[in-house]
Amino acid sequence: MAQKNILVIGSSNTDMTVKTKALPRPGETVLGGVFTMGAGGKGANQAVAARRLGGDVKFICKVGRDIFGDNSLAHYEKEGLDTSGVLRSDLPSGVALISVDEKAENCIVVASGANNDLLEADIDASAEAIRGCGILLLQLETPVPSVLKAAKLAHEAGATVVLNPAPACPLPEELFSYIDLFIPNETELSTFSGLPVCDEESAAKAAAAMRAKGVGKLIVTMGSKGSLICDGGEPVFVPARKVKAVDTTAAGDTFCGALCVALAEGKALREAAEFATAASALTVQKMGAQDSIPFRKDINL
């Protein structure tokens, strides 16, 4: 069976992090600290994860005409992504300003910039790529109308449409009918279903409510516990691997990218979830976002 190609449409950010002893209070300047800068954004994280794990991946995003945009584009090309769909905006590239104290508490300010400029007209211009993909992977760090249009185009063309609904925000009911696979965490599932989610039983009930809204299948990610597959039959729980986590950044994004790679290779949903679980377990054992994403050779099933 030929591997399906994966199209990721989403956000591109540059993460700028300062680690310091204490977070500043309003109006206070704190001296000292270690500065790091790295690639981020949920769309970019998922695209890089899918590529490193063996997928044939094209990434569509929007970056500014600035040094951050230039660096991001060079990085994606180095990763082996098809960047022919990357667009430029007159708005600045997206950035996240992150402060982390010695207790690992943080405060984050995100300037979405060019990510908010990924408009419906851009989706129309990318229609050929969308209609030609095997799997479309979406998130919610770009405008919802653009997400809706992309999902509809891919659905009508017969592609598998996957939505990781993060960060949670109001969505049109129409969108759910275009989603073949919905990958929320517990909080997101509760938000969209309107039901409390605290364990496997409540997650299964909330997943059933989402299927009633038109969603095809769901995988509910439950952090260190594992994930729950809800496809209309008896829910199947896939336990997480027991590892020492040092940083959970990009673990969910790695899970989504890995899952799409396994599905593109023809694996069943349970097997795909086990592959994604193994990949995300490696991610949490390293610091950083894309710096922590593993390669296919690292996966031990």
Image (cartoon, grey):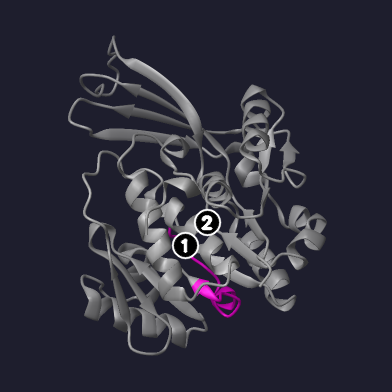
Task: Provide the secondary structure element on which disc 2 rests.
Answer: loop
Among the 4 quarters of the image, the one containing residue 200: bottom left
The majority secondary structure of the magenta stretch comes to loop
Point 60% across, 51% down: residue: 10
Q: Which mark is residue 140?
A: 2
Point 19% across, 25% down: residue: 102
Q: Mark 1: few, some, or many residues within 10 Å (few <14, many ≥20)?
A: some
Give the quarter of the figure containing the N terminus. Answer: bottom right
Task: Provide the secondary structure element on which disc 1 rests.
Answer: loop
Q: Position of residue 21 (x, y in %)?
A: 21, 19
The residue stretch that appears in magenta: 167-181
Q: In the picture provided, is 105 more to the left or to the right than 60?
A: left
Q: Position of residue 278 (x, y in %)?
A: 36, 56
Q: Residue furthest top?
A: 31
Instruction: Out of 256 and 300, give the one closest to the viewer.
Output: 300
Q: Mark 2: few, some, or many residues within 10 Å (few <14, many ≥20)?
A: many
Instruction: Out of 30 and 27, give the one closest to the viewer.
Output: 30
Q: Which mark is residue 165?
A: 1
Give amino acid for label 2.
Answer: Leu
Q: Are marks 2 and 1 in contact (CB under 8 Å)?
A: yes
Among the 4 quarters of the image, the one containing residue 8: bottom right
Instruction: Out of 34 and 98, give the one closest to the viewer.
Output: 34
Point 21% across, 44% down: residue: 244
Instruction: Out of 218 and 298, give the one closest to the viewer.
Output: 298
Point 52% across, 84% down: residue: 214
